[in-house]
Image (spheres, rainbow, N blue to C red):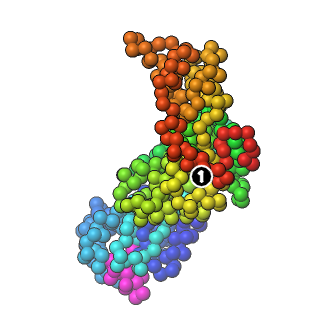
Amino acid sequence: MTPDLHDLELLLRSDTPIVLIESIEEPRVVELFARLALRISEPGFCWTVTDGLRRIEYDSEPQRMLSGPTEILRHIRITPQRGLYLLLDFHPYLDDPLHVRLLKEIAQGYAGLPRTLVLLSHALEAPAELRHLSARFTLRLPDRNRLMVLIREEAKAWQQVTNQGAVRATREAVDQLANNLLGITESDARRLIRNAIRRDGAITQDDVAAVRRAKYELLSPDGIISFEYDTRSFADIAGLSNLKRWIERRRAAFLDPERQRDQPRGLLLLGIQGGGKSLAAKAVAGYFGVPLLRLDFGALYDKYIGETERNLRRALETADLMAPCVLWIDEIEKGVATGSEDEGVGRRVLGTLLTWMAERRSRVFLAATANDIQRLPPELIRKGRLDEIFFVDLPTAEVRRDIFAIHLRQRGLNPEHFDLDALAEASEGFTGAGIEQAVVSARFADSTREEVAITTETLLNELANTQPLSAIMDAQIERLRTWAQGRTVPAHGSSDPS
């Protein structure tokens, strides 16, 4: 007996008159109930608005005169026969008070004549009058062993259809494919496996990456969180030496699927705008070698007014199913700030987030960024919620020198042809983003030409004509530094954050 069949039999034996099933795997559910009806010797029926009522244990002619929702419910209410009644896509008819009343009367008569109503749809919300008479049933998602069986079955089926020999695959690619299919339904997993094999008769690393993207699209079709394809390497980022060492020491522990205790959970990157916090979040995912998911609280509020908390829970569930992954929450203070007109929503969002942070067991590493510490509630930033808080200050002269070298190299220029020391000295008070913009602007410094060759002189002129962020936001920066002193670990520097 399969686990799903066992769980469903236990539910039916608990004398539950109405069972609610939200699933897109309709054929699988119908087959499951056909097997269950035979197993418990109970007549099984399936209803659709197109065909009416028919038996599910064997082929039979449907009773088309019972195709209307009112007719089928009246029929079930007056029938003297016990049985299982599977009603497919009945959700549009639950808004009708007559249908709700008929469902209630059938359920209330269960003790005298057991007739189990099973409502199956992609989405179901039971009317308040029926909630105490109903129970939800959820199909189990395939585990890793089941996914390996599906891979073998699809490989064998492809071989039989094409007569081209065995599917080419490495053990590593197959293992990664199975791992990346965790968290989706069996029918979706089978379809993705089939597509991967049919593409070239093989299972490769490219197939694993394609399956990962397809899985994300399945889990988050409404775009609550975005899948970031552009992860970075720590080699692309100057400075942040303390942060880099801290991440490097935790990579093996985070990627260990057998580790149950003291698993790395996440960090908060606090600092000024343009300091490289977003690049650092991308680099964490790149160094771990896992997907990067981005949750933008600003977009969440704008897009889902009135149902923010529910959609946040859905986003966090998506992250759990995509594990192992890095969840990047950009400008987290926008979503959990208090003291504003949306304080009630902010408090509920904060509660949802804190509950997930405390209870999650999945390998989701949280990388949160923040610009304004004054708007962050103390419940979020106290020790224990996150593993560490790093402060990203303005880059030092040495770091600014490296930033110039990186951006020049990315534009095909040799940093050795520039006076990097002079550039680092002239850019005091600039952020990494400000330095990059100076490099870009220097290329268009001559108004008589579309582009000019970048030299040390053009860069120095551009820096001299630009107001650094330290001059524009000196008060805010000083306030951040004062708060960070003794409360955070400097992201730049040579101290050991352990």
Residue at 60% of width from left, 22% of height from top? 423
Residue at 36% of width from left, 52% of height from top? 303
Q: Is residue 73 magenta?
A: no
Rendered view: 41 above or below 249? below
| Quadrant housing residue 56 | bottom left
Residue at 40% of width from left, 84% of height from top? 110
Residue at 54% of width from left, 15% of height from top? 457
Q: Is residue 178 visible?
A: no
Residue 255 position within the rendered picture, expressed as x and y whole percent measured from the top left:
68, 48
**Left or right: where 360 falls relative to 111:** right
User: Which sits in the foreground, 237 or 74?
Assistant: 237
Q: Is residue 340 visible?
A: yes
Residue 128 position within the rendered picture, expressed as x and y whole percent measured from the top left:
35, 76
| Quadrant housing residue 478 | top right
Q: Which residues are magenta?
A: 102-117
Rendered view: 494 above or below 27? above
Rendered view: 53 above or below 407? below
Please state which amino acid type lies under the numbered disc 1.
Answer: Trp
Provide the residue designation for mark 1: 483
**Left or right: where 125 falls relative to 363:** left
Q: Is residue 110 magenta?
A: yes
| Quadrant housing residue 258 | bottom right
Residue 282 position within the rendered picture, expressed as x and y whole percent measured from the top left:
57, 40
Rendered view: 465 above or below 78? above
Residue 188 position within the rendered picture, expressed as x and y whole percent measured from the top left:
49, 50
> How many numbered tags mark residues here?
1
State the quadrant of the N terminus: bottom right
User: Which sits in the foreground, 119 or 280?
Assistant: 280
Circle 1 Cα neighbour tier, 10 Å, few/some/many (<14 / 14–19 / ≥20): few
